Image (spheres, rainbow, N blue to C red):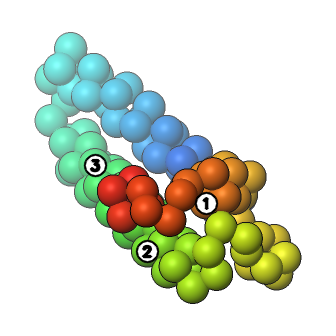
């Protein structure tokens, strides 16, 4: 998992959200309508980042599901190396019969 990349995107989203909150409050209290295009742009960036993160995580889920069916609960070391601890724990603790209902 690209934890650094995910963390960076989440930090960017937090920064964009905080900037938007500041500008929204300023636009409301001071009537600064010239801030609205910036607010809309940042909001679109937030939505795009959210879609990208969701797509990345969903793709990862599908790949992990396929690996689980291919290798079973014991994954090769080179596959486990690219997974975070939670993913490895989840994949090894699931039984084969319950997997379709969990994932």
- The location of residue 98, given as percent across then percent down, is 42, 56
Q: Taking 22 as reference, is 34 above or below it?
A: below
Disc 3 is placed on an element classified as helix
Write the residue at 34% across / 36% down.
20
Q: Can residue 28 be seen here?
A: yes
Q: Can residue 87 be seen here?
A: no
Report the mark closest to the observer, 1 or 3. 1
Residue carrying label 2? 62
Q: Taking 85 as reference, is 57 above or below it?
A: below
Looking at the picture, tell me which residue is in the foreground, 15 or 99: 99
Write the residue at 53% across / 58% down.
95
Where is residue 44, by image quadrant?
bottom left
Q: How crowded is mark 1: few (under 14 residues within 10 Å), some or many (20 or more)?
A: some
Q: Extreme front residue here?
A: 97
Q: How far apart are marks 2 and 1 (CA)?
A: 12 Å
Q: Residues within 10 Å of mark 3 (few under 14, many from 20)?
A: some
Report the mark closest to the observer, 2 or 1. 1
- 48 relative position to 59: left or right: left
Looking at the picture, tell me which residue is in the foreground, 57 or 95: 95
- The location of residue 56, given as percent across then percent down, is 46, 69
Write the residue at 27% across / 20% down.
25
Answer yes or no: do the residues labelled 2 and 1 have beta carbons within 8 Å?
no
């Amino acid at each position: 998992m690209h934890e650094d990349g995910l963390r960076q995107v989440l930090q960017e989203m937090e920064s964009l959200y905080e900037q938007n909150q500041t500008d929204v409050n300023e636009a409301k209290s001071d009537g600064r309508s010239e801030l609205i295009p910036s607010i809309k742009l940042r909001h679109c960036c937030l939505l795009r980042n959210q879609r990208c993160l969701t797509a990345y995580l969903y793709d990862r889920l599908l790949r992990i599901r396929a690996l689980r069916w291919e290798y079973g609960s014991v994954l090769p070391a080179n596959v486990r190396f690219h997974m975070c601890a939670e993913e490895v724990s989840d994949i090894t603790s699931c039984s084969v019969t319950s997997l379709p209902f969990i994932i």
